[in-house]
Structure formats: structure tokens, C-alpha cells
Image: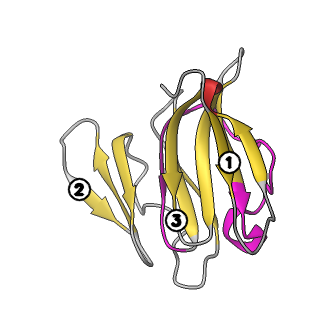
Amino acid sequence: RLQGMELACRSTELERTRHDGGTSSVLSSGYRHTCAIIQDPVRPVARCWGLAANIAPGTGGALSQDGLSAIASGHFHTCGIASSNGSVLCWGDDQFGETRGPNSSAAFIAVTSGYRFSCGLHTNDMEAECW
């Protein structure tokens, strides 16, 4: 937990952006974008900032998704795990299928994102799946 911290982010896309790190439990940076899980009073939500094409649909705002238990930013995309059912949600650039998510309907316990791919770990059998 980033407690009592203020995050100051600078890039060519945003001159300067400040975010209250005291409410963030997870922070993940990709290429020209960063996302955090914000501890909303109702449910944890993702909030992203940086290059708009990498963080759509939530430029600078909360993404309208289920509460998230994990988040991972890749090169031009980000994926998270829904708290309610362990499904994977991805957003950002989809030029190489990065945001299509896994082919299975399995629940996931972990997710990581790379250059043009992401991988997750199935909750029930601990098998890795990449997309």
C-alpha cells in the first residue's frame, strides 16, 4: 500500500499529473502509461493515465469495470483480474490481440503483461495461459 504518498508523473502526453498514492494498493507502468488499483469505498477500481490510446477507455479516470484484485501493464495495454470471479479484463491497444484476453473462461489468480502479450495463472490448476 502506498500510504501517505503523492505520485507526480511527467511525460510528453501529460505535462504533469498528480495522483494520491495513499489510496493506491498496486501500481503498474507500461510504455507511456501507468495504471493503479484505487481502493474505492465500494470496490477497488483501475485508474490509468498517460498516452490515451494505451489506456482507453479510461483516460485519467476510473475504468468502468468490476473491482480488480490484480493489474499488469504491458507495452501498449493493461490487464486486470476481476475480484468477483477471477476473469481477466484487458484494455488499450489491440494491434496484436493484447486486449482480447485469454481463450478460456477459467478464473485467474495472477496476471502479467509484456511487450505484445499477457499471461495469467489459472486459479484451479495453476496452469499458465498466454494471449
Q: Which residue is mark 3?
A: 30
Residue at image point 68% right, 48% down:
8
Bounds of the magenta span?
Answer: 49-75
Marks 1 and 3, how far apart in space?
A: 16 Å
User: Quarter-wise, where is residue 104 in the image?
Assistant: bottom left
65 in the magenta segment: yes
Q: Are marks 2 and 3 in contact (CB under 8 Å)?
A: no
| Relative height, residue 119 to residue 32 (above, below) | above
* Left or right: where 80 falls relative to 115: right
Marks 2 and 3, how far apart in space?
A: 21 Å
Q: Which residue is mark 2?
A: 128
State which tag comes first along the sequence, 2 or 3: 3
| Relative height, residue 25 to residue 27 (above, below) | above
Closer to us: mark 1 or mark 3? Answer: 1
**Callout 1 amino acid:** Ala
**Callout 2 amino acid:** Ala
Give the SS element for disc 3.
loop
Q: Which residue is mark 1?
A: 8
Report x, y in % for residue 39: 63, 24
Q: Are marks 1 and 3 in contact (CB under 8 Å)?
A: no
Front residue of 125 and 118: 118
Crowd tier of the residue under label 3, counting other residues whose Cα lies within 10 Å: few below 14, some 14–19, many 20 or above: many
Report x, y in % for residue 84: 54, 27
Q: How is the image coloured?
A: secondary structure
Residue at image point 37% right, 56% down:
112
Give the SS element for disc 1.
strand
* Left or right: where 120 falls relative to 49: left
Give the SS element for disc 2.
strand
Report x, y in % for residue 15: 81, 65
Front residue of 37 and 101: 37
**Callout 3 amino acid:** Gly
